[in-house]
Amino acid sequence: AQKVTQAQTEISVVEKEDVTLDCVYETRDTTYYLFWYKQPPSGELVFLIRRNSFDEQNEISGRYSWNFQKSTSSFNFTITASQVVDSAVYFCALSEGSSNTGKLIFGQGTTLQVKP
Amino acid sequence: ETGVTQTPRHLVMGMTNKKSLKCEQHLGHNAMYWYKQSAKKPLELMFVYSLEERVENNSVPSRFSPECPNSSHLFLHLHTLQPEDSALYLCASSQTSGGAYNEQFFGPGTRLTVL
């Protein structure tokens, strides 16, 4: 069965600290895609990144970086030198290659609070 | 207008009312989705429309009735709701070509309160 687990419900850090958000997934598909979305207080989910199951290269985009490890079925997200504007709910999601509808399976979300 | 828009942004209704949520996407996509986001629950997929045809219905109660008149518009008709239906309802769109590969773009949501 497909499943995404974000074990951290809430994280609170002080500005400029680094923070890592964990994501563990389960799927039987060999082709799948992993996503991270950010949900600020305004409500809409903002797409951050997509990785496919055949590309385990880590990715860095500014202060954001992602660590994809198939061996542990994890796709963790690190924010370096966090800022108050990073405060939001972050969702990890899975889309299986066998799905022809692009159905996303979301984790429970991690609420990140960055204090000044 | 750009991206995905949803109206109204907030809605309060009684259990006997009938109301509709509207979603419009300006991205040229051909798949649209309804999600429900309740407090302390992960986002739940409700319906998927691809090329205006409903392709997924995730065991949603019949008091929720979707409608997709064209690839740019999606409605969610509500009737005789229960208080537990109070939630944030999010609409999203994507391209169907590429299937699971394509990211979904979300609207800001409608905050629904059922009294």
Image (cartoon, coloured by chain):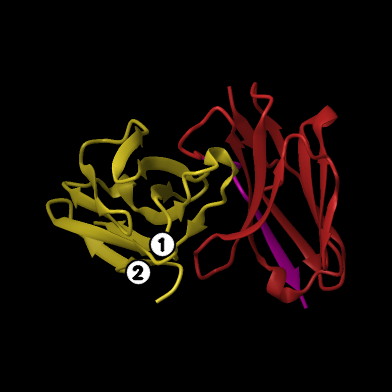
Residue A77 in the image: x percent, y percent? 78, 52
Task: List the residue tagged with mark 1.
Answer: B109
Task: List the residue tagged with mark 2.
Answer: B9
Q: Quadrant of residue A49?
A: bottom right
Say whether residue A92 is left or right of residue B54. Answer: right
Distance of mark 2 from mark 1, alpha carbons? 6 Å
User: Crowding near pointer 2: few (<14 within 10 Å), some, many (20+)?
Assistant: some
Chain whose colour in the figure is red? A
Residue B43 in the image: x percent, y percent? 49, 46
**What subunit carries mark 1?**
B
Residue A94 in the image: x percent, y percent? 61, 39
**Tag 1 or tag 2, which sits nearer the N-term?**
2
- Identify the residue at image location x=29%, y=68%: B8
Q: B77 or A70, which is in the foreground?
A: A70
**What subunit carries mark 2?**
B
- Identify the residue at image location x=52%, y=52%: B104
Which image quadrant: the C terminus of chain A? bottom right
* Colour used to depict chain B in the structure image: yellow
- Whether residue A105 appears in magenta in the rendering, the answer is yes
- Identify the residue at image location x=63%, y=36%: A4
Q: Quadrant of residue B65?
A: top left
Instruction: Write the start and end of the magenta stretch as one range.
Output: A104-116
